[in-house]
Amino acid sequence: MKPRQTKTIPQKDLFQPQLVDIINPNHPLVRLAKVIDWNQLDNELGGHFSTVIPPKNNSNK
């Protein structure tokens, strides 16, 4: 549930603007993302979601 960590690129690409340069920092969703406690949200809801895909059930063959 947490936002993915971004990798820092040592040098900017001249032909691809960075996301931080495109988004409006005053947009309500951007402001909301800054106040959410992502660790608590992950702890509360993380157990309900799986990051591992279960194996296929081959008993139907």
Image (cartoon, rainbow, N blue to C red):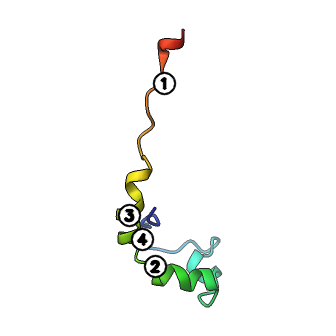
Q: In the image, what residue occupies the spot 46% across and 61% down?
A: 1
Q: Which mark is residue 8?
A: 4
Which label lies toward us, 4 or 1? Answer: 1
Q: Which residue is mark 2?
A: 36
Regarding mark 4 in the picture, which secondary structure is present there?
loop
The kind of residue on which mark 1 rests is: Lys
Compared with 37, 49 (above or below) is above
The kind of residue on which mark 2 rests is: Ile
Which label lies toward us, 1 or 3? Answer: 3
Question: Does any portion of residue 7 appear in the rendered image?
Answer: yes
Regarding mark 3 in the picture, which secondary structure is present there?
helix
Q: Which residue is mark 3?
A: 44
In the picture, the quarter occupied by the C terminus is: top right
Q: Earlier in the sequence, mark 1 or mark 3?
A: 3
At which x and y percent is residue 43? 34, 63
Query: What is the crowding at mark 3: few (fewer than 14 residues within 10 Å), some, or many (at least 20)?
Result: few
Q: Which mark is residue 32?
A: none
Report, in whole angstroms, how far the alpha carbon at label 3 lies from the one at label 2: 13 Å
Residue farthest toward the top in the current orientation of the protein: 61
Which label lies toward us, 4 or 3? Answer: 3
At which x and y percent is residue 25? 59, 88
Question: Does any portion of residue 18 appear in the rendered image?
Answer: no
Q: In the image, what residue occupies the spot 60% across and 75% down?
A: 14
At which x and y percent is residue 44? 38, 63
Report, in whole angstroms, how far the alpha carbon at label 4 lies from the one at label 1: 37 Å
Judge by depth and name the residue closer to the eye, 41 or 18: 41
Q: Earlier in the sequence, mark 4 or mark 1?
A: 4
The kind of residue on which mark 4 rests is: Thr
Q: Which residue is mark 1?
A: 56
Compared with 46, 16 (above or below) is below
Q: Earlier in the sequence, mark 4 or mark 3?
A: 4
